[in-house]
Image (cartoon, rainbow, N blue to C red):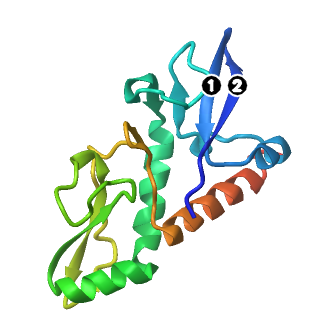
């Protein structure tokens, strides 16, 4: 159930910019758009995603950090991860971006989200390692998480948007 992200036109400083987020227009209208909920910026003059080359997208490091924190916390409860860990036995289990064309073949480094250490057929807590070479947007499109991780990410982003601001 991977859905396409939304593009929002905002004024930053004196420039009009286009931000990309997984939150719906209704959610953004109701709660606003926190920094953690912004995948990144489109290049100046680019207003939409259709046919956009990867070099016209700038990743938001705050979102990337939030993404990997969420995965690190929630990856151990994903049934597919637990099943793959049982098959591996001991070693590393790579979390692949679902946009990769052939998960059983050669996977581009930009499509490896991270890895989890497996011991005795179990994913090890606190062992998740992010891949610094993973890209949110490539010529194959925006990143795609396993459904359980996507739902966890959206839940956390919505909770952030609902949290009262400090000092209010």
Q: Are marks 1 and 2 in contact (CB under 8 Å)?
A: yes
Compute the Cα span from label 1 to label 2. Answer: 5 Å
Foreground of the two, 29 or 105? 105
State whether residue 66 appears in this view: yes
Foreground of the two, 64 or 9? 9
Task: Tell me: 44 left or right of 10.
Answer: left
Q: Residue furthest top?
A: 14
Q: Dividing the picture into quarters, in which one does residue 11 lie? A: top right
Q: Where is residue 149 shown, x and y percent of the image?
A: 50, 67
Q: Residue at x 38, y 80 (%)?
A: 80
Foreground of the two, 122 or 25? 25
Q: Residue at x 68, y 8 (%)?
A: 14
Task: Tell me: 26 left or right of 34.
Answer: right
Circle 2 residue: 9
Circle 1 residue: 18
Foreground of the two, 104 or 130? 104
Q: Residues within 10 Å of mark 1 (few under 14, many from 20)?
A: many
> Circle 1 — which element?
strand
Task: Tell me: 97 left or right of 146.
Answer: left
Q: Residue at x 45, y 81 (%)?
A: 77
Q: Residues within 10 Å of mark 2 (few under 14, many from 20)?
A: few
Q: Where is residue 132 shown, x and y percent of the image?
A: 28, 45
Q: Where is residue 31 shown, x and y percent of the image?
A: 80, 46
Q: Which disc number belongs to residue 7? A: none
State whether residue 129 appears in this view: no
**34 up-or-down from 3: above or below:** above
Q: Where is residue 47 shown, x and y percent of the image?
A: 62, 22
**63 up-or-down from 7: above or below:** below
Task: Tell me: 50 left or right of 91.
Answer: right
Q: Residue at x 59, y 36 (%)?
A: 20
Q: Dividing the picture into quarters, in which one does residue 13 lie? A: top right
> Circle 2 — which element?
strand
């Amino acid at each position: 159930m991977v859905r396409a992200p939304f593009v929002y036109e905002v004024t930053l400083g004196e420039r009009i910019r286009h931000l990309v987020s997984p939150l719906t227009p209704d959610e953004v209208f109701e709660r606003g758009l926190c920094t953690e909920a912004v995948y990144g910026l489109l290049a100046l003059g680019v207003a939409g995603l259709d046919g956009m080359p990867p070099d016209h997208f700038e990743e938001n490091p705050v979102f990337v950090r939030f993404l990997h924190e969420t995965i690190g916390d929630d990856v151990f409860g994903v049934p597919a991860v637990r099943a793959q860990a049982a098959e591996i036995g001991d070693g590393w289990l790579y979390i692949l971006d679902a946009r990769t064309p052939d998960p059983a073949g050669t996977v581009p480094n930009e499509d490896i989200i991270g890895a989890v250490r497996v011991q005795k057929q179990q994913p090890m807590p606190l062992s998740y390692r992010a891949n610094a070479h993973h890209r949110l947007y490539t010529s194959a499109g925006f990143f795609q998480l396993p459904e359980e991780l996507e739902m966890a990410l959206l839940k956390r982003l919505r909770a952030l948007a609902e949290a009262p601001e400090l000092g209010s």
